[in-house]
Amino acid sequence: MTALSELTYKNSLNRRQTEKAIDIIKTQFPRILSEKLNLFKVSCPLVIMDGTGINDDLNGIERPVRFPIKNQADASGVVVQSLAKWKRWQLAEMEVELEEGIITDMRALRPDEDYSPIHSLYVDQWDWEKRIDPSMRKLAYLKETVRSIYQAFVEMEAIVCERFPELSPKLPADISFIESETLLQRYPSLSPKEREDHIARELRAVFVIGIGGKLSNGESHDGRAPDYDDWSSENEEGFHGLNGDLLVWNDVLQRSFELSSMGIRVDAEALTHQLKLTGEEDRSRLFFHQKLLNMELPQSVGGGIGQSRTCMYLLRKRHIGEVQCGIWPVEEQKKCKEAGIALM
């Protein structure tokens, strides 16, 4: 990542303008997205009970915030890290109809997150999940959904730039797609993040397909837990994976910038296969996994869209601390001050 001190930065919006712009984005973007994907808003938890398998392990190693609950005999509660599995469970609980979905205003804590200009301990996402028919578990449907989400970004950017003429549109009209294996073959000597930088710089907006399974070099493009996205099933293009990340090129940071991670979710067969691949078959005994293996959960597609990431990109900010209140090490605060970045 380019160091903060190496970038020339002009903050186009002052603090008050920034707060107003954030409010516009957080009010209008979920409405636009909901119209495109046929979603309705639902309430969501900040804390859930430990040991249910509903909380997300993300890359499989991150520790959740855990604490004892006095009135439940000191049973452990955990702060959510994301809501991928909880949302799918809710589709069943609420008897959501086919091709209808839910969207939440998710707040989470990820204490193992590494600090950076685009990462903090506090996570805010528009988390969404949509019920689909088993016949729709195909790459073509995933791409159709990605295009709809991307158009929501394009429309939101136009609204922001019209309201704040100091800003100008950057997104291309359409998004491109590339398989993670194709990306590896194109740039075999580069790391996954370096590959993303190259392709995002070239295409400006791209969805990288197939994240979680091992590629031809024996390594995965990035880690994914085995129990939400389907990253192992063969798709129509002969590769593996029905998930991916939506990336744009960030001119301010001069790097690729992830706005969303999403995918078609595992069915019982894919879950069993992925648990075996990761050596985590013991998870199959957990509440969520039992419901899925017993065919008690609907097939779905879903993902998360970073609220602060979206604001950071659309408002051309250099640091996520310019669009959210966070906890930063003294050294990070010092670097930001020297670079002319005012953290909230």
Image (spheres, rainbow, N blue to C red):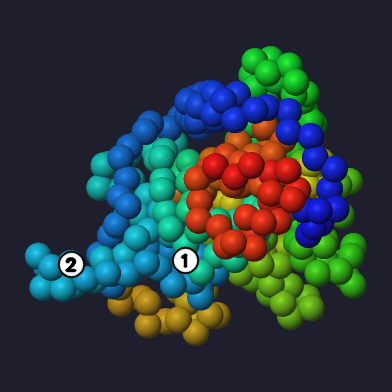
Location of residue 246 in the rendering, given as x and y in whole percent from the top left corner: 67, 47
Residue at the (50%, 51%) spot, across then down: 326
Residue 90 can be seen, yes or no:
yes
The residue at the point 27 percent across, 69 percent down is: 67
Task: Please tell me whether mark 2 sits on a helix, a strand or a loop.
Answer: strand
Residue tagged 1: 111
Identity of the residue drawn at 41% across and 40% down: 105
Q: Is residue 250 left or right of residue 157?
A: right
Q: How far from the left and from the top, in percent, is residue 269? A: 46, 68
Disc nearer the start of the sequence (2/1): 2
Q: Amino acid at mark 1?
A: Pro
Which quarter of the rendered picture does the N terminus lie within? bottom right
Residue in front for this viewpoint, 279 or 304 = 304
Amino acid under disc 2: Ile
Helix, strand, or loop for circle 1? loop
Alpha carbon separation for disc pair 2 and 1: 20 Å
Residue that appears at 51% across and 65% down: 58
Counting from the top left corner in percent of width and height, residue 40 is at 38, 31
Q: From the viewer's side, name the closer residue of 209 and 84.
A: 84
